[in-house]
Amino acid sequence: ADAIKSLVTPTPDGDWFSTGVYTTGNPYGIAEDIVFSMPCRSKGDGDYELATDVSMDDFLWERIKKSEAELLAEKKCVAHLTGEGNAYCDVPDDTMLPGEK
């Protein structure tokens, strides 16, 4: 509900909201062709544009890159379902729940 509200309500000047978007053509260097949470702004018309002036410190970049690696590993696991080749699961151990293998 918050994501929809953010898209149909104009974003206040200097503000932004975060929502999952397709990464093709993003200015942050996040891998292409995944859905990733990005800083966005809306004019309230149901569409969005990426906010490109959001400052991020080293800690945040480290967390972003870790999330990106997890999503790319998960994408490999389902490659046979998306028609992108043979599946190969190499999900990082630190993303597993206790008891998972």
Image (cartoon, grey):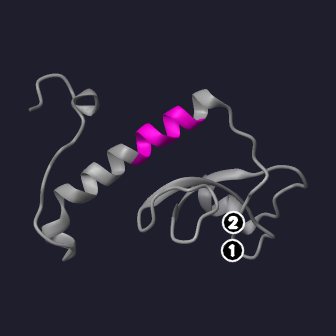
Q: Residue at x 21, y 30 (%)?
A: 93
Which mark sits nearer the N-terminus, 1 or 2? 2
Image quadrant occupied by the N terminus:
bottom right
Report the predominant secondary structure element of the magenta stretch: helix
> Magenta segment range?
61-68
Note whether 51 is above or below 60 in the view shown.
Answer: below
Note whether 78 is above or below 56 in the view shown.
Answer: below
Position of residue 2 measured from the top left corner of the image (x, y, whole percent) = 62, 53
**Mark 2 Cα shell of 10 Å, populated few (<14), some (14-19), many (≥20):** many
Q: Residue at x 51, y 65 (%)?
A: 23
Q: Residue at x 76, y 52 (%)?
A: 16
Element carrying mark 2: helix
Say left or right for 79 vs 21.
left
Q: Nearer the viewer, residue 10 or 23?
A: 23
Position of residue 52 measured from the top left corner of the image (x, y, whole percent) = 74, 57
**Mark 1 Cα shell of 10 Å, populated few (<14), some (14-19), many (≥20):** few
Say left or right for 35 vs 76.
right
Note whether 66 is above or below 9 in the view shown.
Answer: above
CA distance separating discs 1 and 2: 5 Å
Q: Is residue 62 magenta?
A: yes
Give the residue at mark 1: 46
Q: Nearer the viewer, residue 18 or 64?
A: 64
- What amino acid type is highlighted by mark number 1? Gly
Residue 100, label in figure: none
Q: Is residue 46 magenta?
A: no
Give the residue at mark 2: 7
Residues marked 1 and 2 touching at CB (< 8 Å): yes
Element carrying mark 1: loop
- What amino acid type is highlighted by mark number 2? Leu
Image quadrant occupied by the C terminus:
top left
